Image (spheres, rainbow, N blue to C red):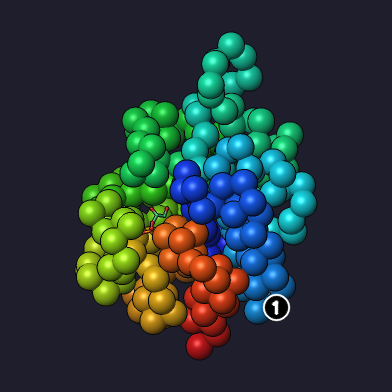
């Protein structure tokens, strides 16, 4: 399975848990069906299995742990994703950082299992360093813009632009960007910088009309 063009991270917002999560999942399913643009979702753990079972969209976890099955209280073994039909996971999100050895272990296991690993990075240096691990994608997300509504593609285009070529030189590693992406124009600008897709949260999870917002964002891939 390839890396979705749009990934919506539900985080732990009240609006995107339980019924809210199902509404966004339904919206993502409809919009990807209608537009042909692949939309993946990263719901909170508690909602993830219900969504994977009931909606025809790729479900990624927000985090996974560098452990095998065993006595690890409160941890998610990489292999367990396969049991539940999850397609992959975000890894090293700036709100859930990991050490480099942990990321290496997770990515290598995910590659072995054919799971999508979307490894998040905060800047150019980290992006390039992480792409060496050959994840499915590196998502460039300057933490200071996360949740601000100020898009990385407009406010810090150089961070994205300078990461794209070195990451793509690694071979089969896709590039996403995220932080503050809110409008179709933000997505268009990101695509102009050379990314393959976007990772976002607030614009969809806090929208009063998630389906309309996703339709707007998906529209940016059509031109
Ligand atoms: O994982 C996506 C996220 O960190 C970006 O958040 O709210 O700026 O779209 P947001």
Sort mark 1 into few (<14), some (14-19) or many (20+) by Cα contacts within 10 Å.
Answer: few
Depth check: 9 or 193 in front? 9
> Can you tell which quarter of the image residue 191 is in?
bottom left
Residue occupied by mark 1: 34
Name the side, left or right, on which 82 lies relative to 72.
Answer: right
Residue 7 x/y as whole percent? 52, 59
Secondary structure of the residue carrying numbered label 1: helix
Name the side, left or right, on which 167 lies relative to 40.
Answer: left
Q: Residue at x 32, y 66 (%)?
A: 149
Q: Residue at x 44, y 58 (%)?
A: 201
Depth check: 58 or 213 in front? 213
Residue 200 appears anywhere in the view: no
Q: Residue at x 60, y 71 (%)?
A: 211
Q: Residue pushed farthest right?
A: 54
How many marks on residues?
1
67 lies above or below 93: above
Residue 92 x/y as whole percent? 40, 40
140 lies above or below 5: above
Depth check: 107 or 188 in front? 188
Q: Residue at x 69, y 41 (%)?
A: 49
Q: Residue pushed farthest bottom?
A: 223
> Can you tell which quarter of the image residue 147 is in?
bottom left
The quarter of the picture showing ligand 1: bottom left
Residue 202 x/y as whole percent? 42, 60
Residue 117 x/y as whole percent? 52, 46
Residue 122 appears anywhere in the view: yes
43 lies above or below 188: above
Name the side, left or right, on which 142 lies relative to 54.
Answer: left
Q: Quadrant of the N terminus?
A: bottom right
Name the side, left or right, on which 37 lies relative to 159.
Answer: right
């Amino acid at each position: 399975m390839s890396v979705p063009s749009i990934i919506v991270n539900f985080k732990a917002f009240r609006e995107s848990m339980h019924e809210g999560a199902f509404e966004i999942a339904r919206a993502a399913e409809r919009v990807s069906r209608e537009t042909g643009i692949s939309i993946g979702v990263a719901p909170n753990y508690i909602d993830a299995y219900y969504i994977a079972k009931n909606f025809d969209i790729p479900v990624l976890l927000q985090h996974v742990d560098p452990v095998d099955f065993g006595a690890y209280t409160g941890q998610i073994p990489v292999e367990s994703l396969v049991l539940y039909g999850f397609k992959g996971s975000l890894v090293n999100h700036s709100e859930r950082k990991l050490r480099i050895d942990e990321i290496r272990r997770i990515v290598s296991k995910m590659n072995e299992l054919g799971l999508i690993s979307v490894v998040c990075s905060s800047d150019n240096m980290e992006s390039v360093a992480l792409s060496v691990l050959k994840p499915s994608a590196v998502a460039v997300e300057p933490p200071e813009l996360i949740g601000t509504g100020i898009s990385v593609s407009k406010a810090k285009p150089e961070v994205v632009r300078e990461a794209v070529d070195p990451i793509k030189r690694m071979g089969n590693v896709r590039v996403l960007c995220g932080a503050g992406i809110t409008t179709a124009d933000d997505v268009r600008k990101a695509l102009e910088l050379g990314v393959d897709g976007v990772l976002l949260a607030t614009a969809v999870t806090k929208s009063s009309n998630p389906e309309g917002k996703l339709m707007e964002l998906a529209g940016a891939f059509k031109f």
